[in-house]
Image: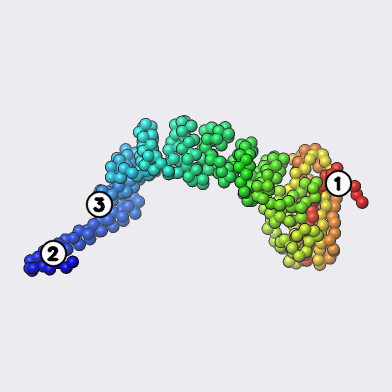
Amino acid sequence: MVFRLSSSVARVALVFAAFLLAAALSYSSIRNARAAHNTGLETLKGYEKATQLEPGNPLNWYLLGHYWLFNLEEPDTRNAITAYRTSLSLDPRSANTWMDLGAAYETQGDFQAARDAFLQATRVYPLSAEVSWRYGNFLLRLGELPQAFSEIRHAVEVDPQRAAEAFSRSWRVDPDVQTILDKVLPPSGGVYLDAIRELDFNEEVAPAMSVWARLVALHPHLKLGDVFPFIDMLLRTHHTADARHVWDEAVGLAGLPPPGDPASSVLWDGGFETGVRGGGFSWVFAPSVGVQTSLDTTTKHSGNQSLRLGFDGKRNVNFSDVCNFAEVRPSATYRFSAWVRTQALTTNQGIRFRLIWLENSQAASLDTSDVHGTQPWTKIEMPWTSGKDVYGVRVCISRNPADEFNIRIQGTAWVDDVSLVPQSAEGPKP
């Protein structure tokens, strides 16, 4: 539709009205920009100026209240409450403002007003993990545990990344791990793993095993590496039997096929078949200068692959950096065996194996003979007897340095079918 103006006066009036509208919009835009600039300063003066420029903007009052409540140098809870209530008069559906108002009342010791504010936040945003989390922690501080646990559980259900902290805070006020598992943590493999990691930090073995039992009952699919820290903690605290129990269950939950070890061998994956490494009862390949370690599918004694060690010929290598750990019985005799092949492996110090264990709180070790030069697949074996208090032994692939410092080792070695078998479990020898 086209409007036609019949007189010059009307046209002038329209132009003037347009000018006023543009001026008003320009002023509003400038005022908004100035307010945003002042809040961006993150200073008391800036927040106060923003509320003067835009007194109808609830965010400006919220930011002013937040400053008064959480500023470490000049906190003022009374002014914070005033600012928050002004903000809520403009936007009563702001859960964040209600929660901060609750925190301000709690700081003043007005717990009923704080409870009312937190409850209002839950009504405004009942599905919020943050609202349930902060209200639950408020109730924890009041000692109202059943309702606190219910709110914290809801927070973890919505946001599982809160699981570790939820467990830690709840467990501090109620050390009954079964209660925490029943009331706080939703049944989830990831949630239980986070709780176990929290317990790992303080080496809390018994409660961690309780959480693990709950996890196993869910039959989740796990990545074996997720359990390494837990098992390593159990080994570090000398709970070797528990560590092996958890390992065997974790292998099942990871869906790994049997590694093909001799049925009686206590060393897991002695043939390097699974490709699993890095912790627990798997092989650990520590970085080593002058030695390259890899899995080789083209050269093996049995199965699908072996371990290949390549020496670069630049160093007199002192190597003992590929290791595995086995649970053993005290005062028992075992036969260690492994197969080694070498190709042009120089020097008179080749590849050997070292068994390392703790006995009477002292480190003890025993070395096999070595293989060097160029040799076909050769079996290395020796007997070993554990002490009366020995429950675990570390098996390492080693190379001792040559006596003369400037002698450098080069060449290649392959290792396969490493085992540690109880003598009583061995069949008759041919």
Q: Distance between the residues labelled 3 and 2?
A: 30 Å
Q: Which residue lies furthest to the front in this view?
A: 1
Q: Residues within 10 Å of mark 2 (few under 14, many from 20)?
A: few
Percent coordinates x, y for residue 287 in the rendering: 68, 58
Q: Quadrant of residue 338?
A: bottom right
Q: Residue at x 77, y 46 (%)?
A: 266
Q: Distance between the residues labelled 3 and 1?
A: 88 Å
| Residues at marks 3 and 2 touching, judged by CB atoms closer than 8 Å | no
Mark 2 vs 1, N-terminal side: 2
Amino acid bearing label 2: Leu
| Residue 22 point in image, percent of width and height | 20, 62
Q: Is residue 66 left or right of residue 155?
A: left
* Residue at 20% across, 58% down: 24
Quickly name the residue at label 3. Answer: 53
Residue at label 1?
A: 426
Residue carrying label 2: 14
Q: Look at the picture and state if 262 lies above or below 403.
A: above
At mark 1, the secondary structure is: loop
Q: Which amino acid does label 3 sit on?
A: Leu
Is residue 26 among the parts visible in the rendering?
A: yes
Q: Could you say whether the residue bearing mark 2 is in a helix, strand or loop? A: helix
Quarter of the view holding residue 105: top left
Residue at image position (75%, 46%) is 326
Check disc 1: other Cα within 10 Å, few if <14, some if 14-19, many if 20+.
few
In the rendered image, the quadrant that contains the N terminus is bottom left
Q: State the image coordinates of residue 66 (x, y, percent, origin top left).
A: 36, 45
User: Which residue type carries mark 1?
Assistant: Glu
Q: Residues within 10 Å of mark 3 (few under 14, many from 20)?
A: some
